[in-house]
Image: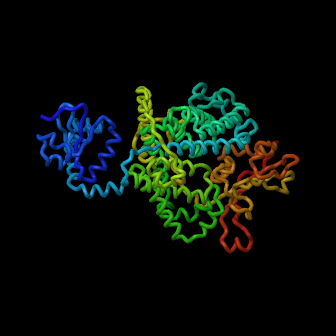
Amino acid sequence: MQPQSSKPLLVYDNDCDFCRYWIAQWQHVTGDRVDYAPYQEVASQFPEIPISAFENSVQLIQENGTVLSGAAAVLRALNSGFLLWCYYHLPGFAKVSEGVYRLIAQHRPFFSAMTRWLWGSHTESTSFCFSRWLFLRALGCIYLIAFLSLWVQVHGLIGSNGILPADQFLAAVGQQVGTSGYHLVPTLFWLNPSDLCLHLLCAGGVVLSLVLIAGFFPTWTLVGLWAFYLSLVSVGQVFLSFQWDVLLLEAGFLAIFFAPLQIRDTLSRASQPSRAFLWLSRWLLFRLMFASGFVKLASDEVWRNLTALNFHYETQPLPTSIAWYVHQLPEWFHQISVIGMFAIELVIPFLIFAPRRLRTAGGIGLVGLQVLIILTGNYCFFNLLTIMLCLLLIDDVTWKRFLPKRLMPSIRLREQSSHRYRRICIGVVAVLLFLLSGIRFSGQLFREIRLPAVAWITPFRSVNTYGLFADMTESRPEIIVEGSNDRITWKTYEFRWKPGDLTTAPKWVAPHQPRLDWQMWFAALQGDYQNTYWFLNFMGSLLRGNPEVLKLLADNPFPETPPRYVRATLYNYRFTDPATKRSGGLWWEREWRRVYCPAISLR
């Protein structure tokens, strides 16, 4: 008869390096619920257990004296409820579990080496307190960029004298769908759709971003940031319809539950972040990256035949000057780059769920791709958002090895006694979000499968699908807008950032997003003004000389009075070759294509 104890005792082989490592890890999980001892010290206390049993597998002596061994002992000690249920109720699960355990036990030197290679040699408790601290401050910085970037142009885009006034949009929604509009367009502007409200929400977003960066009231600050930005996106119409806008809302919504529920987020009194929302944030990163590669491979032949980068650098919305130089590189380089891009977007995302070292290596690969994209294209804060999500792939122990000691702050974990009902609520929300995102992600990958409709969640833009450049543009049409008083002499409206003047180098504008310049790129791909519903509003604003809209442009060729006529012409733009650039200083060359919008006037 084995002696009884007040808590279970897990007995292991202290001569086994593999056993010592995992026992140290399990101790962090079980805390003081389970005692641990090497059989070399305590085997004599259990004469009824053969020494060979101790040598072959761990033994769990429970409080009542019963003994479990192998996989059953591990699952019981770790109190793994779901796996224990499968072990005792799912046919074949116990047999497979014990088979895997015996395989590992019989080849412990090999699996010990694999463990050290995949997880490293340290036995400290795995925590993500510093990663969360960095993540929340990075998120605050990106919110700050988003609100500031929008603030300087919001009145010209959706103000009362803007291109697509928000107040008129809400009035039309209310007229068409009535009270259903409150769900279809969730926004605080239903209370007051004025220009002052636009100003206050942008200003409020800036203030809350600074509060989040400072670490005060992180949970409630994130609620406010999400609500403010959702309000702006909901009435922003085409000008706030980009993937980074919804990615910011989804990441920001997850962060509400990931942030610590305390007055000040400090590392001197840190708590372990929610594992459920840590994994949901990683799941978001996986969906973002894998879907980006999948849609390219599934939708466009030029990606499959590795020729997409032959013209991507010059046809992307807002290239940088570095893109001109990369475009000149030989075709074999572009083909190798496409292969590397597919490897990063389709293979590396699976490392997000791998052990520490592979996960860290995967994160470095994903960050590297984002840096290369930043160098060659202006995608505002999209790449910064992706890099921010990669921070959650690195645990605190790895940060200590990456950062110099003077930069790595001291982390003191505090005891966390979360209320039972709060844990239940967080668990329910996490499961719901995982199911909803899984349905939408599966629908994106397997379009022929009929899946449950989740359209009710769409207006909140916090469970989304992603995938840039599914259809590669192989040419670059550009709209040139001109004004005239006599229809003979035409003066060009120059934009701040999009290509126009052939001698002007592509500019670096990220992380700011000039949203009108971006929409002009999409408008040029639509064929003519009749397929771009907002374009005539823009032209009308030029004819009226609306100062809010004119501020979005580089200059106003009619500073005294607005022109009587405006028109738009479509050109094909291409990067010049090095010889042309050296001789004439031209970055672009263009060819007239056709009229995009004929001459119009207010009359």
Judge left or right: residue 577 versus residue 568. Answer: left
Residue sitting at x 45%, y 36%:
414
- Expressed as whole percent of the image width and height from the top left, the position of residue 442 reads 42, 44
Nearer-the-camera pick, 589 or 601: 589
Nearer-the-camera pick, 49 or 571: 49
Answer yes or no: is residue 97 visible. Answer: no
- Expressed as whole percent of the image width and height from the top left, the position of residue 465 reads 50, 44
Judge left or right: residue 389 versus residue 561. Answer: left
Residue sitting at x 69%, y 55%:
498
- Is the residue 102 above or below the residue 428 in the image? below
- Is the residue 102 above or below the residue 431 in the image? below
- Expressed as whole percent of the image width and height from the top left, the position of residue 390 reads 49, 50
Q: Quadrant of the N terminus?
A: top left
- Expressed as whole percent of the image width and height from the top left, the position of residue 270 reads 48, 38
Judge left or right: residue 265 versus residue 237. Answer: left
- Toward which corner of the image does residue 72 lie, by quadrant? top left
Nearer-the-camera pick, 197 or 260: 260
Nearer-the-camera pick, 332 or 279: 279
- Toward which corner of the image does residue 237 lie, by quadrant? top right
Question: In this figure, what is the number of numbered marks?
Answer: 0
Residue sitting at x 70%, y 66%:
587
Q: Quadrant of the C terminus?
A: top right
- Is the residue 587 above or below the residue 135 in the image? below
Answer yes or no: is residue 161 visible. Answer: yes
